[in-house]
Amino acid sequence: MKIMDLEGADKITFCGCRSTRIEQRGKNAWIVKNDDVKAVVRGIAAEDLQIDFDQAVIFIAADPLA
């Protein structure tokens, strides 16, 4: 799945598995479970996304300096 327009209030739901991680590849953040790519968030840095395993969501992390 390619995600092209993720905004601050948007959330991505996922299975909540602890094996899910976010990797930076070029200018995109890849959501990966084990060796399987689940989604690519285009134009977003991996460090800007946060995983909440308890709620099974991935969202844009709030910038504490904003």
Image (cartoon, rainbow, N blue to C red):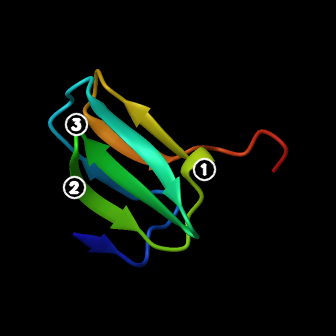
Distance from disc 1 to disc 2, alpha carbons, whole Å, reads 18 Å
Q: Position of residue 12 (x, y in %)?
A: 30, 52
Q: Amino acid at mark 3?
A: Asn
Up-down: is 53 above or below 28? above
Q: Extreme bottom residue here? A: 4
Classify 58 as above or below 7.
above
Mark 2 packing: few (<14 Cα in 10 Å), some, or many (20+)? some
Q: Amino acid at mark 1?
A: Asp
Residue positioned most to the right: 65
Residue occupied by mark 1: 48
Q: Residue at x 20, y 27 (%)?
A: 17
Q: Where's residue 14, x and y in %? A: 20, 43
Of residue 59 and residue 47, the one placed in the foreground of this image is 47
- Which one is closest to the eye, mark 2 or mark 3? 3
Q: Is residue 51 left or right of residue 19?
A: right
Q: Earlier in the sequence, mark 1 or mark 2?
A: 2
Q: Which residue is mark 2?
A: 38
Task: Report helix, strand or loop for mark 1.
Answer: helix
> Residue placed at 28% from the left, 21% from the top?
54
- Label 3, secondary structure: give it: loop
Tell me where residue 49 appears, x and y as whole percent. Answer: 52, 47
Quadrant of the image containing the N terminus: bottom left
In three-dimensional space, the C-alpha distance between marks 2 and 3, rounded to whole angstroms, equals: 10 Å
Residue at which label 3 appears: 34
Q: Are marks 1 and 3 in contact (CB under 8 Å)?
A: no
Category of crowding for the residue at label 3, using alpha-carbon neighbours closer than 10 angstroms: few (below 14), some (14–19), many (at least 20): few
Q: Is residue 53 left or right of residue 5?
A: left
Residue 33 in picture, x, y percent from top left: 23, 40
